[in-house]
Image: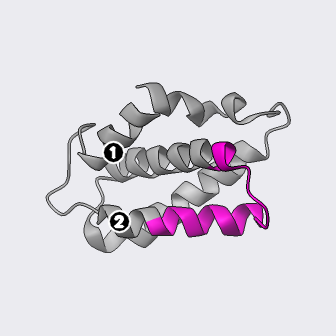
Amino acid sequence: MKASFHRLLFKKGGERATWEYPFAVAGINVSFMLIQMLDLHSEDEEAFDILYCIAFAMMDAQWLAMRASYMEFNEVLRVTRTQLERELSLEDINRIQDLPAYNLLFQ
């Protein structure tokens, strides 16, 4: 997971845009998105950390796929949320490691 975080932080994956998303702001938005989606009251810290990394990696992959600019950040976040909601609603998902996007952590 640490390698995934460093790859995101230092923007090492894919063809990067001229105007990148602000990393700290993206992190806050991904956290808030997950808290809303999961209606979190009590936390399983390890599960949240892994899901956070998955969501951030999904957002980064979507950013690259859309060749987004800074002004498209909210659209990228919306698409990421839709994709994550779709994956979380799959019937055969019993643990975080079953999510299709879990593999993004190891690319």
Q: Point out the tag, 1 or 2, that comes first from the N-terminus.
A: 1
Magenta range: 28-48
Residue 101 point in image, percent of width and height? 57, 35
Tag 2 secondary structure: helix
Tag 1 secondary structure: helix
Residue under numbered circle 1: 8
From mark 1 to mark 2, how far is it between C-alphas? Answer: 11 Å
From the viewer's perspective, tell me whether residue 100 is left or right of residue 107.
Answer: right
Asked if residue 27 is among those painted magenta in the image, a careful observer would answer no
The image quadrant where one finds the C terminus is top left
Residue at image point 27% right, 37% down:
13
Residue at image point 36% right, 53% down:
63
The secondary structure making up most of the magenta span is helix
Residue 96 point in image, percent of width and height? 70, 36
- Taking depth in this image into account, of 60 and 45 the one nearest to the observer is 45
What colour scheme was applied to this rendering of the protein?
one colour
Asked if residue 31 is among those painted magenta in the image, a careful observer would answer yes
Residue at image point 26% right, 64% down:
69
- Figure check: 28 above or below 67: below
Residue 97 point in image, percent of width and height? 67, 29
Dot 2 amino acid type: Ala
- Figure check: 101 above or below 21: above
Dot 1 amino acid type: Leu
- Examine the image and state in which quarter residue 26 appears: bottom left
Residue under numbered circle 2: 24
Residue 76 point in image, percent of width and height? 44, 61
